[in-house]
Structure formats: structure tokens, C-alpha cells
Amino acid sequence: MPYDSWTSLSLSDALFPRDAARSILTDPSLDLLRLTAAAGDVRMATFGRKVKVHQINNIKNGLCPEDCGYCSQSSVSDAPIRKYTTKDEESIVQEAREAKANGVYRYCMVASGRGPTDKETETLARVIKRITDEVGMRTCLSAGLVDLPKAQMLKDAGLDRLNHNLNTSREHTERIVSTHTYQDRIDTLGAAQQAGLQSCSGVISGMGETDEDLLDVAYELHEMEVPSIPVNFLIPIEGNPLFDFDQLTPERCLRILCMYRFVNPKAEIRMAGGREGHLRGLQTLALYPANSLFVDGYLTTRGDGKPKAYQMIEDAGFEVEGLPVAAQRRRPSDLYTIDGAPDIMRPETTGAKSA
């Protein structure tokens, strides 16, 4: 198999061949370790052994009129979530301070809804400026559909990145949402780029899409030169119309990450929502194609906390960007647990019992 040539092709100025990208997803004869190593060589060329850690603050939950079938905050979900309007400014800024103190590289604020009103945009801009000036931290905002004037206001306030995921291909979009179009999402990314914002946009796999759908998104993001690509795996949330299409295994998820790395060699590839439950024991290998991850959960679902994620990163021989190496290390005896519990003794063979 041409693993080395795939690395060379990806690192060249040429577009990675679609047939090769398709093979990464579908060829059963591929050696998974050699594939991962080849994708890792591409990652190392741009990012070295650094891992960017991102944390989401769900600043507005539920109350969304959209009908995205994968989202527990949508109007068509029966998931038992607590709905709330936008958090107060001081809480959002304080949570940014705490995130920075814990080594988080980028603070990602997410507000549910179709898109912010003019007044909401002004509020978000004020919060972003405070985080920029008072905390000195990189920021990303996901707030739905945004036009150029709003994107410009957010840019002027100090926002680094605007997130708006494509989620799936143009053809498959109509099967997962009807209240907005694929073009609406493209237009939001275009507005961000026109305003001088970095764009963050990715995919959700496991929603009944085909291999071609996954490829379409990968190449669309390459064409738009998106620098930050979160690769999400559908989280099975009871009450959501899109629940489980029986498509995701740890190997499948790793292949998807490798394909996105080869097609987008210089982009920040993030193993994002669902990494814990779908990659499972292959999360360490996933750090080779992916140079970024989320900690402390997602919008309405839990995820691994910072200590566990940081330890996984260290164990794999990588480093959390922005966190001193000394702060990442602990004694082996402090780390030794079974199923996450520090009590390692078997109860049936320990304890003081009389003969």
C-alpha cells in the first residue's frame, strides 16, 4: 500500500487524490497502524507534537427553532435538556479565566438559535472584547447564521474564529434539516472570511451519510481553506430524530480522521464530539491524525475532563500546547487506577479477617 506516497502527496501543493481518500475509508486491506503513522507524518510536519485543547461554554441552551435532527436543542428533539437564555456577561468571562488557568488553548462559546439578533450580536461582541482585554485568551464563537455586518462587529471586538459546521454534504443536508440550507451555511463561512475572521467548520459522521458525503465535505473545506476542522461523531442522544445509524466503530472513526488529515494537511483537525464513546481505546492513535480536541464535554453531553485528557496526551508522547510540560506530569503511582477508581485491591482477597 502507498502509505509513504500518500504522505508525500498530502504535503505537496497538489490536491490529494479523491480515489486515494476513498480508499482510506473503504479498503479493508489497509494496515491501520501504517495508515495512522502516515497521517501522523503529515500532522507532525505542521504541528509537531503539540495538541491544542479547546473548551466549550454552552452560553445559551435550547430555545432553537431549527429542526436539525442530530441536535438535542432543536425544535424537534424530545431530549430532556434545561433551556436557558444567554448567560450573564460576568459568568462567561469568569469561566474563560478558569479555562485559561487550566491550560485551555481556545475558549469556544456556543449560543443556540438560528442566528443572533442585532442586540444579541452587540452583547456577544462586548463579552468577546472583555475576554480579549481582561483574560487575554483566544476565542471562537458558534451562534448560527451570521451575515457580514455581524461578522465584522465580532471581528472588531477581537473574535479570532467563527464556527459554523457544514456537518454533511450538500446532497445529504436536506435529510437532516429543513429549516435552513447548505448554502446558508456556506454563506455564513463566506461572511466570516470576508470580515477577516478565521473560519472553523467541520463534519458530523454517523448520520446515515455515504462515503461520498464525507469526501464532499472534506474537499469543500479544503477548497474554502478552512484552518480549523472539528470532526464529530454522532452522539446517540435519546429523543433526537437522528439517533444511531450503526455506522461508527473505532476503526471507522480513525479512518475518517486520517482521511480528513490527508485532504487538509495544514488544517487543525479536531477529534470532537463523540470521541470518547466512539473512538474508545483508539483515542491515543487518533492523536496522530488529529492535533486538537475538546475537553469537559460538549453542548448537552458529558465528555472526558481535563485531567484524563491531559494524561492521555502525555501517555501518547504529545504535549498540551500552552501548558508547561512539568505541569502535565504526575507520578506513576498517582495515575494507577482500575476502571478509574484508585482502590486497586480485590475485596475478596484483602481485608482483615480472622482465621
Image: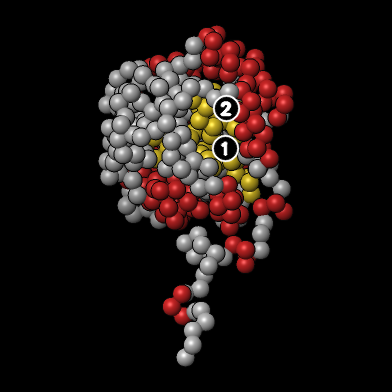
Seen at 48% across and 44% down, the residue is 303
Which residue sits at x=40%, y=56%? Answer: 31
Up-down: is 123 above or below 4? above
Q: Nearer the viewer, residue 209 or 9?
A: 209
Q: Amino acid at mark 2?
A: Cys
**Does residue 167 appear anywhere in the picture?**
no
Residue situated furthest front in the rendering: 354
Q: Position of residue 224 (x, y in %)?
A: 49, 23
Q: Secondary structure at mark 1?
A: strand
Image color mode: secondary structure
**Which residue is denoted by mark 2 in the rendering?**
140
On the image, the x and y values in percent for residue 20 come to 39, 41
Indicate the quadrant where residue 214 lies: top left
The three-letter code of the residue at mark 1 reads His
- Crowd band around label 2 with a 10 angstrom C-alpha radius: few (<14), some (14–19), many (20+): many
The residue under label 1 is 54
